[in-house]
Amino acid sequence: MKTQKLIIQIPCYNEENTLSGMLADLPKELPGIDEIEILVINDGSTDNTVDVARKNGVKHIISLTKRKGLAAVFTAGIDASLKLGADIIVNADADNQYRGEDIGRLIRPIIEEKADLVIGNRKIEEIKDFSFMKKKLQRIGSRVVRYLSGLDIPDATTGFRAYSRDAAIGINVLSEFTYTLETIIAAGNNGVAVENIEVSTNPETRKSRLFRNIPEYITRSIATLIRVYTMYRPLKVFARMGAFLFFGGVILGMRFLYFFIVHKGAAGHIQSLILSAVFLIVGFQIMLLGMLADLIAANRRLIENTLNRIKRMELKKGD
């Protein structure tokens, strides 16, 4: 049987107060896993996060010289984990939100080759630390992601996830805000086998540092969703926008013709003709942009496939 190596990666930013407890909770051995290693990605912490990690026996530590954000830290961790020979990668939070005892269940579908990505869904309704508004936004956001990705993900923003080696190689995060939404949409559009499991959470140890307030979170999340979905389905997005304007132009044009033919003149209705022409031209141009964007998206897929092959070759040489 093939040796299975699990790497648990932990993004950190000023986590000296919570990291020790989180590390102590991680499993030392798991069924089907031969090696378990911990990787800490230090996102430019200004406290003693790195010292705490070393005192707790963490051998693999990556330190970024300045804070770059969750998406960049996650990507750096995935790249480092692959180079360390990981067969399975689990992403966990340093704030001890998730329980180490759930990692075994999280990786089980990957070990059994039933999935390449497993998402640990929190029981949102049972989390006392979440306000009513936050729970409502989580539900709405998950429904939107479900529609855009075609995957049934009850908790789209959870960071507690397990990736197979193949799934990790195919990850290319472009967002600067967070990886959680983009990777789900990418997985759905790339045909990655995804499973969900329910996980428990520990009491909140600190407030989220990903955003300063709810309006900022909503704005940045919507921008990320639109950008990512457009990147994978540009023709669908632009065609609908263009068709809407084009159809509006047709309606206004028919209105002008009605007054011109039935009422024997178009006095007072010339604005309909002008607006119709604008809508028709702009709608047609947007549909052309959609075709161009679709060609660019096809080239992007080819580039991604080439990049993934290069990654596999580099990792094979490293082995």
Image: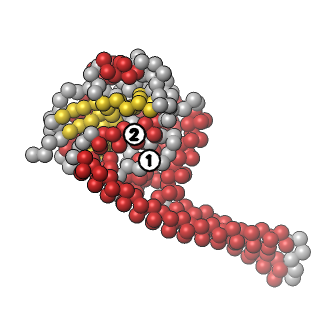
* C-alpha distance separating marks 1 and 2: 10 Å
Picture layout, residue 301 above or below residue 155: below
Q: Where is residue 289 in the image (x, y as percent from the top left)?
A: 59, 67
Work out which residue is located at the far right of the displayed protein and give it: 267
Q: Where is residue 87 in the image (x, y as percent from the top left)?
A: 23, 43
Residue at (45, 61) in percent of width and height = 300
Asked which secondary structure carries label 2, the reply is: helix
Closer to the camera, 202 or 73? 73
Closer to the camera, 209 or 51? 51
Query: Callout 1: 10 Å neighbours few (<14), some, many (20+)?
Result: some
Q: What residue type is labelled 2?
A: Ala
Residue matched to label 1: 173
Q: Where is residue 66 in the image (x, y as percent from the top left)?
A: 50, 31
Query: Callout 2: 10 Å neighbours few (<14), some, many (20+)?
Result: some
Work out which residue is located at the far left of the displayed protein and give it: 1
Residue at (85, 71) in percent of width and height = 269
Picture layout, residue 226 above or below residue 124: below
Picture layout, residue 99 above or below residue 168: above
Residue matched to label 2: 76
Q: Are marks 1 and 2 in contact (CB under 8 Å)?
A: no
Q: Which of marks 1 and 2 is nearer the N terminus?
A: 2
Q: Position of residue 256 (x, y in %)?
A: 79, 75
User: Position of 149 compared to 163: left or right?
Assistant: right
